[in-house]
Image (cartoon, rainbow, N blue to C red):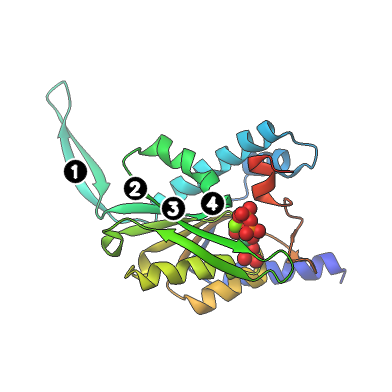
């Protein structure tokens, strides 16, 4: 068995082992967006353009995991339409900096959803996350929460953010991590530590390299999205 196929079989085991993980269907359309984004020659505007489209798919998929109540409305022709509305308050929390990239697509869906911030930075040498700051909605303990963190490598940054939310009184089963790329060890770490956390991702990657970068990966997401390289 080649290294590549060994990595792939580990990947499949991880995605099957945790039923709280939803990986987007790997359609040709999704793979085409990933190809545009992951290409090292993509310009900043090309990168943002395609990443935003994947974010929209991830946020829409996350909404499918939320509870809805019935809502009937009267249409302009006097008929009743039996629709739905969110059952509970919803907020988002971005893990600064990379997570802020997902906020635009949420605003396109609903401008009224509050967005909290948690500033976490990895030490570039040790890869250990450090929490610097958080500002959360006052009623967050009553909310379902979408956590915006596009990159899950070791899982340390995401775990730190989830712990901040739990300490603020959010129920673990009401947290959905919205994620672009995750590594098998990262997802295993998070799911083991937070078994009721739900994760929506667009790709479970093959593995982490010795520098804690995912493979095939995308490079440093924050640098590419915000143009700091
Ligand atoms: C990057 C990335 C994730 C984190 C993932 O953040 O944005 O937040 O690393 O790695 P982990 O799962 O091993 O913790 P970083 O602090 O490097 O930079 P950023 O400011 O660009 O988000
Ligand atoms: Mg980050």
Give the residue pinned by disc 2: 114
Residue 112, x across and y down, in percent:
31, 41
Is label 2 or label 3 in front? 2
Under circle 3, the secondary element is helix
Respond yes or no on whether mark 4 lies under 8 Å from ligand 2: yes
Of residues 96 and 38, the one nearer the viewer is 96
Q: Residue at x 74, y 68 (%)?
A: 125
Distance Cα–Cα, label 1 vs label 3: 20 Å
Mark 1 falls on what kind of element? strand
- Secondary structure of the residue carrying numbered label 2: loop
Q: Residue furthest bottom?
A: 192
Q: Badge 2, how many Cα within 10 Å: few under 14, some, many 20+? A: some
Observer-nearest of 138 and 150: 138
Dot 1 corresponds to which residue? 71
Q: Which mark is residue 62?
A: 3
Query: Residue 122's image quarter?
Result: bottom right
Q: Residue at x 83, y 64 (%)?
A: 4
**Mark 3 or mark 4, which is nearer to you?**
4
Residues at circles 4 and 2 in contact by the CB criterion of under 8 Å: no
Tell me the element at label 4. helix
Q: Indicate which disc, 1 or 3, sits on the residue closer to the N terminus.
A: 3
Q: Residue at x 33, y 59 (%)?
A: 144
Q: CA distance from mark 4 to mark 2?
A: 15 Å
Is the C-beta separation of discs 1 and 3 under 8 Å? Answer: no
* Side (left or right) of 124 relative to 160: right
- Give yes or no for contact between labels 3 and 4 (Cβ–Cβ under 8 Å): no
């Amino acid at each position: 068995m080649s290294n590549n196929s060994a990595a792939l079989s580990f990947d499949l085991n991880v995605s099957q082992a945790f039923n709280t993980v939803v990986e987007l269907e790997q359609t040709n359309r999704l793979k085409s967006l990933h190809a545009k984004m992951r290409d090292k020659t993509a310009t900043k505007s090309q990168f943002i353009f395609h990443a935003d489209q994947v974010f929209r798919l991830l946020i829409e998929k996350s909404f499918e995991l939320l509870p809805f109540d019935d809502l009937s409305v009267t249409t302009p022709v006097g008929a009743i339409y039996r629709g739905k509305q969110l059952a509970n308050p919803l907020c988002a929390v971005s893990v600064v900096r990379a997570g802020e990239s997902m906020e635009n697509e949420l605003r396109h869906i609903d401008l009224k959803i509050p967005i909290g911030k948690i500033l976490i930075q990895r030490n570039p040498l040790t890869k250990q996350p450090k929490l610097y700051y958080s500002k959360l909605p006052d009623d967050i303990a009553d909310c379902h929460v979408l956590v915006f963190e596009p990159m899950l490598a070791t899982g340390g940054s995401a775990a730190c953010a989830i712990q901040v939310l739990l300490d603020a009184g959010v129920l673990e089963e009401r947290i959905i991590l919205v994620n672009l790329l995750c590594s098998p060890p990262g997802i295993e770490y998070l799911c083991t530590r937070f078994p009721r956390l739900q994760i929506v991702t667009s790709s479970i990657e093959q593995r982490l390299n010795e520098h804690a970068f995912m493979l095939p990966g995308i490079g440093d997401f924050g640098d590419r999205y915000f143009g700091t390289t």
